[in-house]
Image (spheres, rainbow, N blue to C red):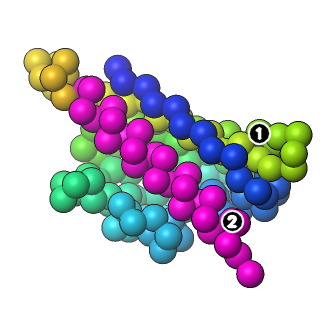
Amino acid sequence: MPYVEVNLPVKATKSEIYPILKNMEKYPEFMADLVSVEVVDRKETTTITKWVSNVDGRIIKWTELDTFDDAAMHIHYKQTEGDLKKFEGEWILTPLEDGTTEIKLTVDFEFGIPMIAGLLNPILKKKVRDNSMNMLTAIKERMENRA
């Protein structure tokens, strides 16, 4: 199963970044690959969200359970239904010595067609890595270019 981990330092504190990460329905406003994110259900520590993404002209849809640990400013997500067999990971915020915060996004996924997984997994892994880094870059730009 492919696993992707990307990280990027951002000139902002955990407490400044976490609300942006948590407000997933706003992601399409500043993340080009996302068509939509809809909150279907919101509870105190979880949301159910429906996602539509456009990756190189291919529409990928899924529903995920997002679990928020506000004290640790940590988010875990897991697909509950959708186009991939498995799609889950986490957002991890780590303060750095210079006053910046490292944002780490992990994605553990499985395409779900074993016979072609060997052929597709390297391609999909690169696409997921690129898309994940684009998400981090969009958050970095949003945080560092705010007025």
**Residues drawn in magenta:** 121-147
Of the pair 37 and 39, the residue shown nearer to us: 37
Indicate the position of residue 64 as horizontal and vertical percent values.
44, 48
Q: Which residue lies under the disc numbered 1?
A: 94
Q: Hey, what amino acid is under mark 2?
A: Met
Q: Hey, what amino acid is under mark 1?
A: Thr
The residue drawn where x is 19% and y is 18% is: 118
Q: Which residue lies under the disc numbered 2?
A: 143
Disc assigned to residue 140? none
Horizontal arrangement in the rendering, residue 103 relative to residue 96 (left or right): left
Disc 1 is placed on an element classified as strand
Indicate the position of residue 107 as horizontal and vertical percent values.
46, 35
The secondary structure that dominates the magenta segment is helix
The residue drawn where x is 63% and y is 44% is: 8
Q: Of marks 2 and 1, which one's residue comes earlier in the chain? A: 1
Disc 2 is placed on an element classified as helix
Q: Residues within 10 Å of mark 2 (few under 14, many from 20)?
A: some
Q: Give the CA separation, mark 2 to mark 1.
A: 16 Å
